[in-house]
Image (tube, grey):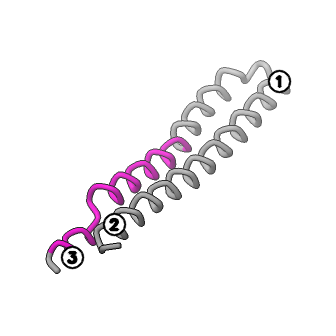
Amino acid sequence: MDSYTIIGAASVIGACLCMGIGSIGSALGEGHAASTALQAMAQQPDEASRIRSTMFVALAMIETTALYALLIAFLTLYANPFWNYAIAQ
């Protein structure tokens, strides 16, 4: 195996791990936030609109974790600095 194959394989494995861990964390966080908000709405129906708007802001902030993981995965795949090093050798 040459260095191109090793760098390519490591990039793909790194991107897969990054998206897998990032997606799991984001999904668990969103599920917990939604269940807590629904429980609070069930206990206090008169505050449901306020809780709902706060929940949507929180879900958007939690979703950015998955988007950052996607960004890092794309950088690992397409802007890997080790490619330039391998080409220079």
Of residues 14 and 87, which is closer to you in this image? 87
Q: Which residue is mark 1?
A: 42
71 drawn magenta: yes
Quadrant of the image containing the C terminus: bottom left
Where residue 68 appears, as percent x and y from the top left, is 43, 51
Tag of residue 5: 2
Kindly indicate the quadrant of the structure image that contains residue 46.
top right
Name the kind of residue labelled 2 in the image: Thr
Determine contact: label 2, label 3, CB under 8 Å: no
The residue range painted magenta reads 62-87
35 drawn magenta: no
- Sequence order check: which comes first, mark 2 or mark 3? 2
As measured in the structure, the alpha-carbon distance from the residue carrying label 3 to the one carrying label 1 is: 58 Å
Name the kind of residue labelled 1 in the image: Ala
Total numbered badges shown on the rendered structure: 3
Residue at 38%, 51% in the rendered image: 71
Where residue 51 appears, as percent x and y from the top left, is 67, 29
Tag of residue 85: 3
- Sequence order check: which comes first, mark 3 or mark 1? 1
Residue at 51%, 49% in the rendered image: 65
Residue at 30%, 73% in the rendered image: 2
Determine contact: label 3, label 1, CB under 8 Å: no
